[in-house]
Image (tube, helix red, strand yellow):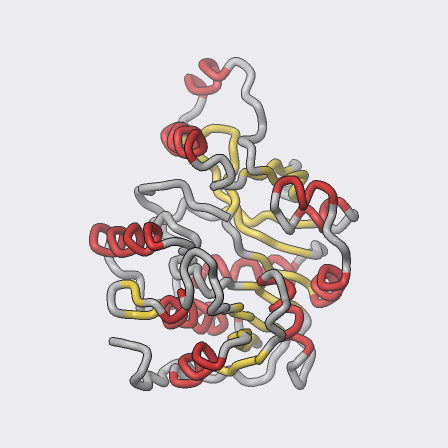
Amino acid sequence: MGVNGPRAFFPVSAQGGDLIVVPARFGSTRLPGKPLLEIAGRTLLERVLANATAAAGLAGDCRVVVATDDARIAAHARDLGAQVAMTAPELNSGSARAAAAARLQDAPPARVINLQGDAPFIPPATIAGLIATLREGTADVATPVYRLDWERLDRLRAHKETAPFSGTTCVRDAKGQALWFSKSILPALRDEDALRAASPLSPVWQHLGLYAYTQRALDWFAQAPQGTYEKLEGLEQLRFLENGWTIATCEVDPPRHALSGVDTPQDMALAEDAIARLGDPFPAQPQSGPQSGPVSEPARS
């Protein structure tokens, strides 16, 4: 099914305490118009909206809006029954677009979830879990991570030989708060042979590029300058850590469908292949937790 016919089955959420924002840009350099491109017969935006709507249902007191600067994407979102916030073209990140969309709401949300419009395989339970983490704790930001077994770690290392900035790792404290994120594989592993013999799991955590923010933290982020390490690593979450904000990490299972984001034609092909091999997760239904399974390539953030 294409983008021309209406398929308005996404319920419009009532005004509530939290907001899931789906930033969706047309002007991708590597894959123009990607929110409107189809994977296995459904557009990227349609798939992301299905997950967002299911997550809002799981969380309760939550609504969904698409943030875009493009009339074509806005029209498709409305055809799907979604609310739309038109945001400025010059906004340079999904977080900035999410902040702008939140400011356009009649009722300011308490928390904002930034669910990128090119991330079709993030389970609704993972999204809802971030909302619960912020509601129940004291962190400013929440984001998911998963622990790598040795096979996945070996695969990530091999992948970084040709794509060194693909795949983000996280170092956490004993309470699960993030100490650091890096495009390098952290921590360095002394006496790795002994570690491999002791456990099937490595000490390395990989990050999924999904964030939930308190409104206060997101408002600060939208006006704060880039941080030194944020520029060096190309990771916007480091802006928070460099300035003393707290990021809670939520442990999830390794993703069944490997790609957390679709950025290139090659990613589109990988996504189609994953659906053909592993099944199509659409339509998204409320789940008790994220699914686990084989991973064909390291997920990226």
- Write the residue at 62% across / 41% down: 233
Give the total of numbered labels: 0
Q: Nearer the viewer, residue 72 or 295?
A: 72
Q: Position of residue 71 (x, y in %)?
A: 48, 81
Q: Position of residue 7 (x, y in %)?
A: 32, 83
In this view, which residue lies farthest toward the front? 29
Q: Nearer the viewer, residue 185 or 179?
A: 185
* Image-based side of 276 in relation to 47, left or right: left
Q: Position of residue 61 (x, y in %)?
A: 57, 76
- Write the residue at 21% across / 50% down: 277
Residue 180: which quarter of the image?
A: top right
Q: Nearer the viewer, residue 266 or 126?
A: 266
- Write the residue at 70% across / 67% down: 215
The answer to whether residue 8 of the structure is visible from this angle is yes
Residue 172: which quarter of the image?
A: top right
> In the figure, 141 relative to 285: above or below?
above
Q: Position of residue 153 (x, y in %)?
A: 43, 31
The answer to whether residue 64 of the structure is visible from this angle is no
> In the figure, 19 relative to 226: above or below?
below
Residue 196: which quarter of the image?
A: top left
* Image-based side of 31 in relation to 114, left or right: left
Q: Nearer the viewer, residue 158 or 137?
A: 158
- Write the residue at 55% across / 70% down: 20
Q: Quadrant of the N terminus?
A: bottom left
